[in-house]
Amino acid sequence: MIQRIQTLYMFIAFVLMLLLFFFPLAEILSGEGQVYTYRFDGLYYAGHETVYIRTIPPIILLSVIVGINFISIFLYKRRITQMRINFINMLLMLGYAGLVYFYVRDFSNSLDSELITYKLFDAFPFVAAIFTYLAIRAIGKDEALIRSIDRIR
């Protein structure tokens, strides 16, 4: 149901995670002065569309997170299942943020970097996890309300 507040929370989390496909997550300045850009799918030469190193696990994990987010919006008739799926998705979002941090640090160490600049978009998985948590709480309140109404009958 679109009019529920948890649907809005899940949609915001979906959009935030979807935006990670389109924006760079970090820039790395190597020891030679070359600037590299880290996106969801790998490390690029800055200003070029050529891939320096492709990373497969973040591609798969981000795709799974976005897919689960989209599917969980339409599971409104099965609230307990929706809560469980959102909890798992929240853990995956936090894992994705850790994976991005790991890859950026690993690439910066291999490039003998002098400077790593993280972008604002690195905070999106954390913000999406917060919205997912708010959705879980709202779904729990709905479930408690439904159970209390069932007791009255």
Image (spheres, rainbow, N blue to C red):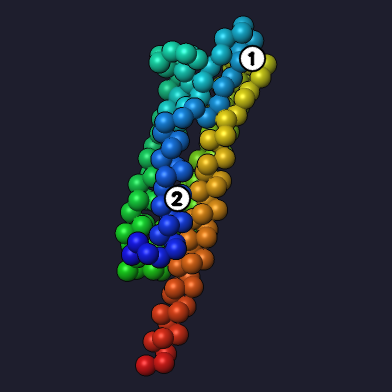
| Residue that appears at 36% across and 57% down | 73
The span from disc 1 to disc 2 (Cα, nearest Å) is 37 Å
Q: Is residue 35 above or below residue 137?
A: above
Q: Which residue is mark 1?
A: 112
Q: Quadrant of residue 97?
A: top right
**Precedes in sequence: disc 1 or disc 2:** 2
- Mark carried by residue 12: 2
Which kind of residue does numbered mark 1 sit on?
A: Asp
- Secondary structure beneath label 2: helix
The percent coordinates of residue 39 (x first, y second) are: 47, 27
Regarding residue 20, the answer to whether it shows in the image is yes
Regarding residue 88, the answer to whether it shows in the image is no
Which kind of residue does numbered mark 2 sit on?
A: Ile
Q: Quadrant of the C terminus?
A: bottom left
- Foreground: disc 1 or disc 2: 2
Foreground of the two, 68 or 47:
47
Q: Is residue 121 above or below residue 84?
A: above
Foreground of the two, 111 or 71:
71
Foreground of the two, 55 or 70:
70
